[in-house]
Image (spheres, helix red, strand yellow):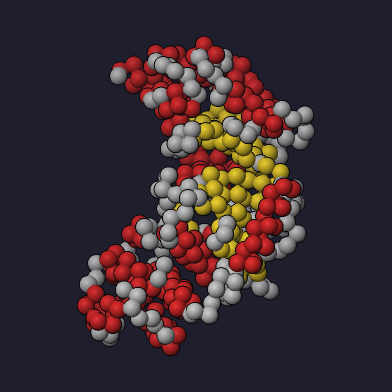
Amino acid sequence: MTTGTLLKSLLDIAGLRQKSFADRMFTSPSKLSKLINGNILLSRKEANDFSERAARILANEIYEPNCYYKLQDLFPFIIDFSSRNELYEFLLTAFSYTIILDLETADESLSDRTIRNLHYSGTKPCKYMFCIICSDYLTRERLSEYEFFTSLPRYSDKYIECFDHIMPLIPTGKFKISMQQFFNLQRKPAAGFRYRDGFAQRIFKEEEYSDLYFWQLDFESSNHFFMLKNQFILLFNEYVGGTPQVTLIRNRAQLNHYTAFVESAMQKASRRSFCQENVADFLNQKADRDEEVRSKMRVISQLAHVRDSTEFPDPLQFFNSILKDGAAFYITSDALADFLFSRSISGQLLKIEDLSPVNRIKHVRNFYKYLDQHKNKQINIIDSHIFSVVIICQGSNSLICLINIPRNNLKYHILQTQSIADEVKNWAALSAVDSFHFIKTLMRQVRDQ
């Protein structure tokens, strides 16, 4: 991203003509055109005044509630701006960043081994720079794959404020993105430790645009990293008093060092996320502390091996296994609806050929009869367009199972029960879906078709 491309995009979004903007900037249309086309650069002396004035004018023109949608092509990672001033601060930070990039590009003495690190401190600057840098690298020349690795506790603890209101607005399938998230399940939470609100829902959202995997690994360092392989590293730490600081690293030697570190860490880490292709070894392990959640995974995994409608498990047997030891079962509304109205799940994912609506109704009717007979409050439906099952166990770990039709895969995430249990329970309460009535209505609608 250059200052010229950033400015041209923002002018288009704001609906401002270059001449009108030049007049308000007290500069000539010719000079503005040269800046936009990359024919001139702003000096460091000019940079502050230009950035402040341009950011203020553009924020005034662009801001309105939910204006982040106007900016999503330019900033796929963005925040929900609470005020015109917050948008001004964000754009000011973006201009300051691109001006530095322009000057670096023009400096022939710099190389990928001598380029200096950039430093930012404070909750807002760290939040802004995370969005700006990630967006910059996603909107540059398209990579075949974007491989992210991070130890940053984005879902909990001390960086909650840094990641509040950040919204990835990345269309499903636009980029091939993988995200390897390291964290320590065994660590005893410190006093004041918090999980971020909406942990499970954020996982749902992240899986829409990336292939997310959790890894258990104990990091001794108080620093945390967020790395796009071979491109950049954001190194997070704290000043005395808890003020967050982020350092942008692009130096090739440092990138190579962190890449080697991550590769070594991957060898030591314990996988906590699985897809159907790599879950077999975990399911076949001897009983250990994960056995409760593993037993639920076995039951769901068996569905992926069903090849004929006659092989579908009996609901009594299925739910007795799932709900054993006081577990609670949650399924999303759209997953049930898709099973009845479409062949996405039955045909594409479960590989059951020619499962007719009559047979689909039959299997859901068995589910319906089970609910009617057992009146089990451990079974709930939650409103979501994501196809998913969540099983909350009584033990320390619980399970999110995501049904990803575009990638034709089942994904399992083993997470601490305390991180998602209350959220999912409240989610079901807010959804207020009567499971018995919901399924009865779906079956009637299918018959009517």
> Residue 417 location, x and y as percent?
65, 41
Where is 356 relative to 396, above or below? above
The answer to which quarter of the image holds residue 447 is top left
> Residue 95 location, x and y as percent?
41, 74
Where is 431 relative to 347, above or below? below
Residue drawn at x 44%, y 36% is 406
> Is residue 368 visible in this depiction of the protein?
no
The answer to which quarter of the image holds residue 66 is bottom left
> Residue 416 location, x and y as percent?
66, 43
State the count of labels: 0
Name the residue furthest front. 108
| For residue 351, side relative to residue 30 (left or right) | right
Residue drawn at x 62%, y 40% is 273
Q: Quadrant of the C terminus?
A: top left
Residue 6 vs residue 294, the one in the foreground: 6
| For residue 396, side relative to residue 443 (left or right) | right
> Is residue 133 visible in this depiction of the protein?
yes
Where is 22 relative to 68, above or below? below
| For residue 356, side relative to residue 429 (left or right) | left
Name the residue furthest top. 310
Name the residue furthest bottom. 45
Q: Quadrant of the N terminus?
A: bottom left
Residue drawn at x 62%, y 63% is 255
Residue 8 vs residue 335, the one in the foreground: 8
Residue drawn at x 55%, y 27% is 379
Where is 204 relative to 98, above or below? above
> Residue 48 location, x and y as percent?
42, 83
